[in-house]
Image (cartoon, rainbow, N blue to C red):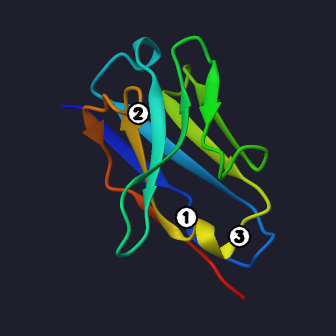
Amino acid sequence: DVQLQASGGGLVQPGGILRLSCEASGFTFSDYAMTWIRQAPGREVEWVATVNEHHVTYYSASVKGRFAIFRDTGRNTLYLQMNSLKPEDTARYYCARGLYGSVDYRGQGTQVTVSS
């Protein structure tokens, strides 16, 4: 079974940093693009970033320059380094298999709260 286990969320002050991790299992991790998405209460799902099988990265305008997505194929793990966090980054963050728009599995997510 495909499993995507996200971790690393928490409460952080504005301007702070967090690193999210997502451990993947049940499929050949290196064969798939991987994506981070987020959802705040009462809002639609928002695409955050994608890294493809060749480690090429793509970012939404709202996080470009502050967040970095990368993957460790040896550890079957996806990461999201989040710097200069803002209150509007508060959301539940999910890792997902595939390109945004064609995601087929999503993990349970990890909560990120940015507040003073």
x and y percentages locating residue 1 in the rendered image: 18, 31
CB atoms at circles 1 and 2 under 8 Å apart? no
Cα separation, mark 2 vs mark 3, equals 23 Å
Cα separation, mark 1 vs mark 3, equals 14 Å
In front of the other: 113 or 62: 62
Numbered tag placed on residue 9 in the rendering? 1
Residue 56 in the figure: left or right of residue 42: right
Numbered disc 3: secondary structure: loop
Circle 3 residues within 10 Å: few <14, some 14–19, many ≥20: some
| Residue that appears at 36% across and 61% down | 44
x and y percentages locating residue 38 in the rendered image: 45, 56
Q: Is residue 77 above or below residue 64?
A: above
Q: Which residue is mark 3?
A: 86
Of the image marks 1 and 3, the number of the one nearer the N terminus: 1
Tag 3: amino acid: Lys
- Mark 1 or 2, which is nearer the eye? 2
Tag 2: amino acid: Tyr
Q: Quadrant of residue 86?
A: bottom right
Q: Which residue is mark 2?
A: 100
